[in-house]
Image: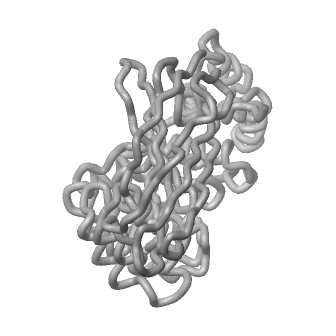
Amino acid sequence: MAEPFKDNYNKELVNNLAKEILSVNENFDKKKLMKLVFDKEWENRELKQRMRHITVSLNETFNLPYLEALEVLLKIYDRFTKMWSAIIFCDFVEVYGLDNYKESIKAMELFTTKSSAEFAIRPFIIKYPDKTMKQMLKWSKHKNEHVRRLSSEGCRPRLPWGIALQEFKKDPSPILLILENLKNDPSEYVRKSVANNLNDISKDNPQTVIEIVKNWKGNNPNTDWIVKHASRTLLKKGNEKVLKLFGNSSNVRFEIRDLRLKKKKINLGEENEISCVLTLKEKTEKKLRLEYAVYYVMAKGQLSRKIFKISEKTVKPKEELIVSKKHKFRDHTTRTHFRGIHKIAVVVNGNESEALEFELIK
């Protein structure tokens, strides 16, 4: 089993960080930092809690004004190639640099090339919206792909684990000029961020994204990939306008039979399988988007629906299609499972079949 991400923050990482700081600042107390970081609560902290704890401990050990501490970090940041180490530099700016806009922005432009300042930039967008977004627009034309990605990833309205940008949920127009600059970016890393940003926007402003899909679709393979990936939430919701843009329709006629689940009870870590036979009831062939919905039991007993894609197929009239999909129920960073009655259903072009029940036992 892979080690939890949080274990990347460990004694080796902090020790290396302390050694590099000590090499440019002879007054730095390495022993103090190690003692502060690895306190009795260390093992109980999760990923971001560990990162923030290191940042706070680092500042306490520095015992310097922000700009002086920042100068030390600027001398050593390029010695770190692993994201887990370098992102602490960005976090330091986020926590302590908000009142020093000019110096902090300049530092983030450098630090993000070794990690990502997508979380650190967000308080600056909130406090200094106009000038920070002007800076992000400049970054969208930067020669370094990591800086260009920051210009998109940093202003996602709903960045996971990040502060939500409420004003951009209401009006995403300041973001759109940035995304326009990046839609043909040579870096897949950047283009993926553009798609994820648009997907965020689609959750609050679906029509804005629908218009972008219409304008970008068909221009080239890169923008085609972006708009398809950006539309995934709208497609999962069965949005008729978006389905039609990608050659699907929620009005397609079909029949599902022999719908079944392999198991009625499973343990955490095991998988279940849903299957059925699908027949197209149209006179001409149709494109079908095949998905399945899982209704997870939440902490308070309510159900939460999550859609997963199976495939897309062009199906002929009366053609019988065997649909089968396995799904593993295991805890991970973004989901904790709870015992109880779950449900699974097949979804065809946004139309959901009968949901079948099974029990998850811990």
**Residue 39 vertical placement versus 207 (above, below):** above
Choose between 176 and 362: the one closer to the eye.
Answer: 362
Q: Which residue reaches farthest top?
A: 40
Question: In the rendered view, would you say 55 is above or below 134?
Answer: above
At horizontal 52% and vertical 76% (from top left) the residue drawn is 316
Q: Is residue 151 visible?
A: no
Q: How many marks?
A: 0
* Vertical placement of residue 294 versus 211, above or below: above
Q: Residue at x 72, y 44 (%)?
A: 24
Which of 287 and 192 lies nearest the eye of the viewer? 287
Q: Nearer the viewer, residue 187 or 37?
A: 187
* In the image, residue 340 above or below residue 28: above
| Rendering coords of residue 293 (x, y %) | 46, 44
Left or right: 123 as drawn, with respect to 31: left
Q: How is the image coloured?
A: one colour
What percent of the width, then of the height, locates residue 352? Answer: 38, 50
| Rendering coords of residue 73 (x, y %) | 62, 47
Task: Single out the residue that lies furthest toward the left.
Answer: 170
Q: Nearer the viewer, residue 77 or 71?
A: 77
Within the image, what quadrant is residue 163 found in?
top left
Which residue sits furthest bottom? 219
User: Residue 14 appears at what percent x and percent y?
Assistant: 72, 32
Which quadrant does the N terminus fall into?
top right
Image point (46%, 43%), residue name = 345
181 left or right of 46 in image: left
Image quadrant for the C terminus?
A: top right
Can residue 317 be seen by looking at this rendering?
yes
Seen as rendered, the residue at the extreme front is: 318
